[in-house]
Image: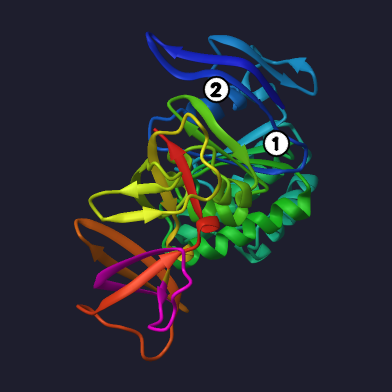
Amino acid sequence: MELRGVDKYFGDLAAVEQMDLAFEEGEFFTLVGPSGSGKTTLIRMLAGMESPTHGDILLRGERINERPANQRPTCMVFQSLALFPHMTVGGNVEYPLKCKKVPVAERRERAAQCLELAHLPVSYYDRPVTTCSGGERQRVALARALAFDPEILFFDEPLSAIDYRLRKTLEKEIKDIQRETGKTFVYITHSLEEAMVMSDRIGVMREGRLAQIGTPHEIYTEPVDRFVSEFMGEVNSIPVKRSDDGQLRNDELGLTVTPPGPLNESFESGTLIVRPENMRLLKDDETDTVNELTGEIFNEYLLGSRIQFQLRSENHTFLVECMRESGRPGAGESVRFGWTPAESMLFPE
């Protein structure tokens, strides 16, 4: 499926602008972005629930702008799941097959296969869907979508109302199902962790446009601008300006910084970005770190095998993340911390 020059206007409001995007067959593509960036509008156009104002939507080279949702080889799993509460689990899964007038015996066999694929036992077939837990209902919705046998499955934040532990399980199960079926999954989420774990490629949206498309590794380590770097995870942001010797300077911190590479001749000022895991606490005898600051530990946050320190230096707050170890400094202690130039990113104003 491909979009070429697609716009979507609601009155004078441009929800999606000049969208050029192609999905590769069998990939897991995730759309992320702040609220109001156009993610849901985009996926509704792809599914046939909205029509573009301008531009074309193509499926295997054929224009499908006016083709209704029920005539497209696609299916949507909604945030609300949209299950039929008066039906059993099996009845919900069979519904798209019933609409296609598939014979009863074949419907039941196909529905049972889809339940198994969605990691639900066939014994749930005759259970009222209202007696299922949130995670089980999520699997029923996925089994129903698979029963339709679409070429492309769309997901609009399906795990947003699920508790953390179950969400982590379902993330892996959905990714496994995508691999097992070989179908194309297009997924919307507000969870950056979901996007990083599940996706083959990620599209970051901002104000109706795509800011960047890439693999999770590319988006995280090589963001195209400050917006993408800050949206895709925690960062330390340091305002800097060019100094006469080709270095970077922050006068408030009294800090001179070696940039990640030679400065462009046009660069005057901008923001230096360092992710918390790329900063480290320095030992007393370490003197070879190029970029170094001194600060006071204000707080600490345990992250399983890792620990994140919140440091304060002058009027700035920094996050430093490292492995948990004994003898670590505590709140109120003064520490040295720093990073190497290659572990930072510089974006001009």
Q: Which numbered disc flags the more N-terminal residue, 2 or 1?
A: 2
Q: Residues within 10 Å of mark 2 (few under 14, many from 20)?
A: some
- Name the mark on residue 152: 1
Residue 246 placement (x, y as % from top left): 46, 44
Q: Classify residue 117 by image quadrant.
A: bottom right
The N terminus lies in quadrant: top right
Amino acid beneath label 2: Met
Residue range corresponding to the magenta coloring: 281-304
Amino acid beneath label 1: Ile
The residue that label 2 is drawn on is 49
Q: Nearer the viewer, residue 63 or 304?
A: 304
Residue 220 placement (x, y as % from top left): 55, 50
Residue 90 visible: no
Total of numbered circles in the picture?
A: 2
Q: Separation of disc 2 and disc 1 at Cα?
A: 15 Å
Helix, strand or loop under label 2: loop
Residue 325 visible: yes
Residue in the picture at 55% in, 30% down: 43
Residue 291 magenta: yes
